Image (tube, rainbow, N blue to C red):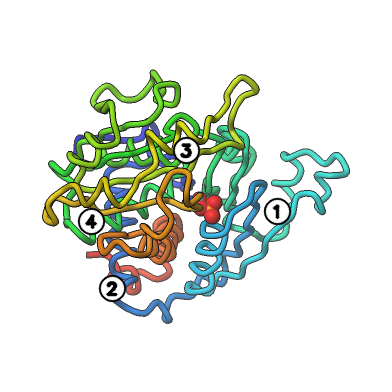
Amino acid sequence: MTAHKSATPQTHRHLLDISSLTNEDILTILRVAARLKRQTAERINLSAYPCLLLFEEPSTRTHLSFWRACHQLNIPTTSLNTQWSSLAKGETWHDTIQTLEALGFRFLVVRSPQKYFPHQLAQFTRTLHIINAGDGDHAHPTQALLDAFTLLEIWHTLKDKTIGILGDIRHARVAHSDIHLFLRLGARVLVAGPTEWLPNNLPPSVIRVSSIEKLVAQADALIVLRVQKERFTQSETLDLTTYRQHWMLRTAHIEALPPDRQPWLMHPGPMNPGIEIEPELPYRYPRSLILRQVENGIYVRMGVFLWMTAPTLWQEHGWLLRTLLP
Ligand code: CP
């Protein structure tokens, strides 16, 4: 990992994107998550840190795995539907944040269609810890952390591993966070997909590959992405027949390789079988990690909660953290 420090060390911690984390932060979250997966968390009690889950876009795994992570750590948890909140009556986000603070919430997990929305909310608060659960096409840092965690369970290091990312890179916040984290952890990153969906502003070390066959042949792990139609601009269209023909991952692509060269398969979900991936492949392929990613999301999000509160908890529960941190 190359050295990387945030410009200002955070005493009050948020998780807004991968670039806001130091290498030490990343390793702490991943190590705590690994420890929590091996041992029960029943002695951990964060009941003094109520959490609000605020999702302005659909979600199954992120919403529910944050909820499960809260439950495991004894964090009181509530979801807010903004359409039924006073935001619908004209209350500003600034006033909403002040209200959440007065109500005693300490964590705010937010998913928004708007880029950098969690960053804006972080400007309004002194006591809430803001966690970005996906902002527009910008970032999805907890997904990247759980993706790295899942690969580290297999390999123990990402150094010199080749990770291929396939499909709609442009609109995928998961891809943007994954790329930054995988490069930080020393992996080689390849991307492939329709030219118009490979953005110009990818980090220079990311390698563009011209076909799905070349990507699959080089990748130690392959991350397949959903086509994010909800983020298309008015001028963007999808020719499904052409997309399937050129970019849908099929069993035949994998079986063209010798068994010891076949890649680990990942997908952040939700999947659209028959568009970006052949139906049945995710559940039939022995090297599919897709459901393990979902399970690991709980432990990684527990790790995030503990990392965020660690400076305070260290004074209150130093004994506990000493048992979790290596
Ligand atoms: N990976 C992911 O963000 O899935 P959900 O949209 O179901 O939360």
Residue 173, label in figure: 3
Residue drawn at (58%, 36%), measured in percent from left and top? 229
Rendered position, 161 above or below 243: below
270 vs 207, left or right, is: right
Could you say where residue 314 lies in the image, as x and y percent from the top left?
38, 63
86 vs 104, left or right, is: right
Q: Tag 4 or tag 1, which sits nearer the N-term?
A: 1
Q: Tag 2 or tag 1, which sits nearer the N-term?
A: 1
Element at badge 2?
A: helix
Could you say where residue 280 lies in the image, as x and y percent from the top left?
40, 60
In the picture of the structure, the residue carrying the numbered disc 4 is: 152
Could you say where residue 260 lies in the image, as x and y percent from the top left?
11, 55
Separation of disc 3 and disc 4 at Cα?
21 Å
Q: Quadrant of the N terminus?
A: top left
Residue 299, label in figure: none
Element at badge 4?
A: helix
Residue drawn at (27%, 43%), measured in percent from left and top? 23
Comparing labels 1 and 4, the label whose residue is closer to the camera: 4
Local crowd size for mark 2, using a 10 Å CA cut-off: few (<14), some (14–19), many (≥20): few
- Amino acid at the residue labelled 1: Leu
In the picture of the structure, the residue carrying the numbered disc 1 is: 100
170 vs 219, left or right, is: right
Residue drawn at (70%, 53%), measured in percent from left and top? 100
Separation of disc 1 and disc 4 at Cα?
37 Å
Give the number of marks: 4
Q: Tag 2 or tag 4, which sits nearer the N-term?
A: 4
In the picture of the structure, the residue carrying the numbered disc 2 is: 323
Q: Are marks 2 and 3 in contact (CB under 8 Å)?
A: no
Q: Are marks 4 and 2 in contact (CB under 8 Å)?
A: no
Q: Nearer the viewer, residue 266 or 194?
A: 194
Question: In this view of the protein, can residue 285 be seen by the observer?
Answer: yes
